[in-house]
């Protein structure tokens, strides 16, 4: 459910005409809807009912500082995977005690910064990392709260690049190794093992893998209790899918209910780390048609947005719905929507039935609010897009368009 809709013959972002945004800010342009973000955040925040919980938005899905500030203002914490994301989160005013730090390759300076900020906890992904954190914490005379990321070996039934909870994936520890790590953590003077965590994958469209992982974690937590390790935070990661095309993923409320049912009688604080499910359908990428052309094999619509702006179609073969900003009635043809980049993998859609659009018109690429701008680059020396946030009939620029000067600013 989002607030991008066709009314009076054109596309609106809440109370603002998308065409007007394209003219005012230029294209390619990321447009986010505050009302949609707010709605999605609340869907998670209410999903767990009476359970003690924390919703930690995944910064890697969308790290724009204004967007993080907006979510922080609603009470959100964040899940970070780098020192840079910590910097974004702190700049946005996120409460450090609502920050969890995941990722397999945390570096010394990142660990120091996170300890200095006094974040809620580190989601530790290896025994070496645990020792490293313990040593730095001791040096800094600052306790490190940690959880161990468990690899529950659950098949999330999603795209292989975004599946993370299988034995063959690089993430987390299996339970045998994790048991050893918890005992190590318990003995380390500046380490407090307070949590248990998993994140099994992204764009999940079924509840079962979550429940299966949760059951494994709870059984493990019970066993740990006998060894004197008392888990207070249970972090189930993110991963809830969204509708890009015809997927029918569970709602946050469905996931919440399954968690509430499985946790009956326990006093744990549940952490969820949704990224895509909060931001994905809260953003669109607006682009302008440059040219159309027809080869003997295909029709092409060449637009001013490219794989450097939105890489998901090229990287995962991902589907993004594309629509006209000002629809007109005309015949539909099968086209590839492609960008100006010199790569054959530079496409936003392939073999898509679209109205026969013409140069100068604007198109909206939907469901682009997560893993859109954050995965963008300057490939082909293309300045990165601008980002705006719409709130009712008001629009604020959340990031200005990069300039040519920005492209070379750091080069000596
Ligand atoms: C990417 C990631 C998330 C967010 O995943 P979504 O599919 O966007 O909800 C949460 N936690 C961790 C550890 C991640 O790596």
Image (cartoon, rainbow, N blue to C red):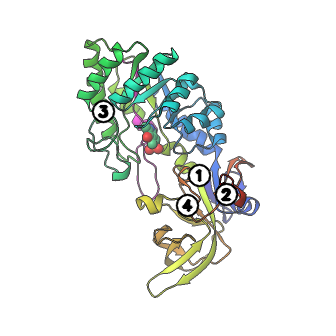
In the figure, 47 relative to 387: above or below? above
Name the spot of residue 92 as percent of width and height, x first: 65, 34
Ligand 1 quadrant assignment: top left
Q: Residue furthest left?
A: 176
- Viewer-side label of 1, 2: 2
- Residue 256: image x %, image y %? 42, 32
Q: Pick the residue in front: 172 or 283.
A: 172
Report, in whole angstroms, how far the alpha carbon at label 4 lies from the one at label 3.
Answer: 34 Å
Instruction: Kindly identify which residue carries mark 4.
Output: 308
**Ligand 1 within 8 Å of the CB at mark 4:** no
Q: Earlier in the sequence, mark 2 or mark 4?
A: 4
The magenta region covers 231-255
Q: Secondary structure at mark 1?
A: strand
Q: Quadrant of residue 169?
A: top left
Residue assigned mark 1: 283
Classify 10 Å Cα crowding around label 2: few (below 14), some (14-19), many (20 and above). few
Asked if the residue under mark 1 is in contact with the one under mark 3, i.e. CB atoms within 8 Å, the reply is no
Q: Give the labeled residue for mark 3.
A: 173
Q: Earlier in the sequence, mark 4 or mark 1?
A: 1
Residue 310: quadrant of the picture? bottom right
Using the image, determine if residue 100 lies above or below residue 285.
above
- Tell me the residue at 42%/35% (across/down): 237
Q: CA distance from mark 2 to mark 4?
A: 17 Å
Q: Dot 3: what SS?
A: loop
Circles 2 and 4 in contact, beta carbons < 8 Å: no
- Spatial separation of the CA atoms under disc 1 and disc 2: 29 Å
The answer to whether residue 206 is above or below residue 115 is below
Residue topped by disc 2? 408
Which comes sooner in the sequence, label 4 or label 3?
3
Circle on res. 78:
none
Placement of the C terminus among the 4 image quadrants: bottom right
Relative placement, left or right, of 171 versus 322 is: left
């Amino acid at each position: 459910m989002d607030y991008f809709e066709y009314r009076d013959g054109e596309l609106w972002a809440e109370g603002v005409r998308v065409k007007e945004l394209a003219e005012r800010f230029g294209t390619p342009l990321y447009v986010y809807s505050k009302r949609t973000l707010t709605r999605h955040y609340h869907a998670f925040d209410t999903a767990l009912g009476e359970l003690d919980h924390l919703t930690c938005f995944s910064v890697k899905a969308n790290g724009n500082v204004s967007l993080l500030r907006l979510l922080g203002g609603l009470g959100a914490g964040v899940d970070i995977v780098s020192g840079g994301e910590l910097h974004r989160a702190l700049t946005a005013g996120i409460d450090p005690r609502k920050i969890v730090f995941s990722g397999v390759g945390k570096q010394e300076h990142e660990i120091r910064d996170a300890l200095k900020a006094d974040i809620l906890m580190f989601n530790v992904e290896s025994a070496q990392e645990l020792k490293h954190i313990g040593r730095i914490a001791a040096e800094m005379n600052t306790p490190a709260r940690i959880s161990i990321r468990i690899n529950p070996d659950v098949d999330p039934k999603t795209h292989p690049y975004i599946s993370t909870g299988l034995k063959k994936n690089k993430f987390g520890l299996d339970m045998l190794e994790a048991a050893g790590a918890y005992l190590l953590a318990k003995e380390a003077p500046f380490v407090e093992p307070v949590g248990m965590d998993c994140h099994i994958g992204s764009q999940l469209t079924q509840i079962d893998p979550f429940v299966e992982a949760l059951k494994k974690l709870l059984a493990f937590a019970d066993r740990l209790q006998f060894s004197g390790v008392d888990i207070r935070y249970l972090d189930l990661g993110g991963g809830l899918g969204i509708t890009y095309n015809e997927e029918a993923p569970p709602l946050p409320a469905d996931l919440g209910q399954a968690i509430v049912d499985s946790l009956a009688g326990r006093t744990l604080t549940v952490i969820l780390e949704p990224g895509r499910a909060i931001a994905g359908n809260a953003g669109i990428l607006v682009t302008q048609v440059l040219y159309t052309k027809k080869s003997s094999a295909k029709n092409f619509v060449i637009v001013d947005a490219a794989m450097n702006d939105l890489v998901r179609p090229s990287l995962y073969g991902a589907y993004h719905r594309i629509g006209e900003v000002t629809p007109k009635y005309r015949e539909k043809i099968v086209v590839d929507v492609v960008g100006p980049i010199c790569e054959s993998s530079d496409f936003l859609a392939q073999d898509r039935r679209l109205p026969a659009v013409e140069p100068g018109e604007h198109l909206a690429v939907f469901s682009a609010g997560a893993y859109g701008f954050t995965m963008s680059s300057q490939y082909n020396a293309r300045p990165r897009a601008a980002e705006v946030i719409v709130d009712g009939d008001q629009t604020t620029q959340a990031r200005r368009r990069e300039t040519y000067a920005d492209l070379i600013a750091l080069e000596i």
